[in-house]
Amino acid sequence: MNLRSPLSHVLGSGSAKEGTDHFWGQRVSAVALAILGIWFLFSLVTMASAPLDYAALADWVGRTSNSVLLILLLLALAYHSSLGIEVIIEDYVHGPFLKVVSLIFSKFAHIAFASGAIFAVLKLAFGANG
Amino acid sequence: MNDSGRPLSPHLSVYRWPITMTLSILHRVTGAGLSVGFVALAIWLMSAAGGAETYASVNGCLHSTLGRLLLIGWSFAFFFHLSNGVRHLFWDVGMGFEKHQANASAWFVIVLAIVLTLALWANIMGAVQ
């Protein structure tokens, strides 16, 4: 007698250990990034001056719609990038130990930079500098 | 290597290099480059949150020659990965798999990415002047 149900025993036991989550996550985040990426690039170009000065940037980031879209961009970007780097590591890093360490490092780095960048957007938006 | 005299299975180098292979490789390379760009974007935003001074130093790096080259590279990588990503989405729904279609879309993606990159930088140069 085992605590695990027969279903729990077979779920995820294929060679991929998962279903089509990776595929779908990559595609859906790609669509989100196509929209958000073009918006971000377009915004940067319309703000372009050499160099893009601090006050103009802080003002732009501070507008609510921009802050929200920037955070969405950062979330989608970190997620999509994480999925992509994951595949690259799986393809080129051999040896189970090094592979798992690289995968964990990549996840941590993506989450860390995303958190840092999102916090930065919030800080600019809530006007910590006045 | 082939001292047995028996035929080897065809090696990649006996084929003429197809354009679709170049795009497949470029998609991965530009994707990896854009991941580095994500880190740069995060650092740039965090520097802005750190105040005008830290922002100015990071912005200074971006406006150096190396910084400009990186920005041009990232913009091309973005347009390429975006265009080729859309090409992949068409494949995902089963469209465009014929050899002539895949070759045509490959060239279309390359030309589009280059044109968009040039248009972007022409626009930026125009705005800066």
Image (spheres, rainbow, N blue to C red):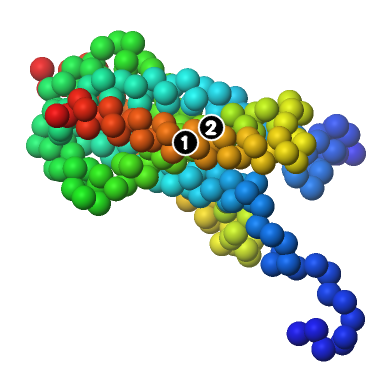
Query: In front here: A87 or B75?
Result: B75
Query: Could you say where residue B123 lies in the image, as x and y percent from the top left?
Result: 28, 27
Q: Where does label 2 land, which residue?
A: B83
| Element on which disc 2 rests | helix
In which chain is the residue bearing label 1?
A: B
Quadrant housing residue A2:
top right
Q: Residues within 10 Å of mark 1 (few under 14, many from 20)?
A: many
Answer few, some or many: residues within 10 Å of disc 2's Cα (few below 14, many 20 plus, some between 14 and 19): many
Query: Residue at (71%, 35%) from the top-left corner?
Result: B101
Q: Please report, as a chain letter, where disc 2 is located.
A: B
Q: Residue A92 carries which label?
A: none
Residue drawn at (9%, 37%), measured in percent from left and top?
B53
Q: Where is residue A47 in the image (x, y as percent from the top left)?
A: 22, 22
Report whether B75 appears left or right of B22.
Answer: left
x, y (%) of residue A49? 17, 28
- Of the residues tagged 2 and 1, which is closer to the observer? 1
Q: Label 1, secondary structure: give it.
A: helix
Answer left or right for B60 relative to A31.
Answer: left
What residue sits 51% from the left and 49% below the top? B29
**Residue B99 visible to an observer of this rendering:** yes
**Mark 1 lies on residue:** B113
> Is B75 displayed left or right of B15 in the figure?
left
Distance Cα–Cα, label 2 vs label 1: 7 Å
Q: Quadrant of residue B1?
A: bottom right
Q: Are marks 2 and 1 in contact (CB under 8 Å)?
A: yes
Q: What residue type is labelled 1?
A: Ala
Q: Position of residue B35 (x, y in %)?
A: 44, 43
Extreme top residue here?
A: A64
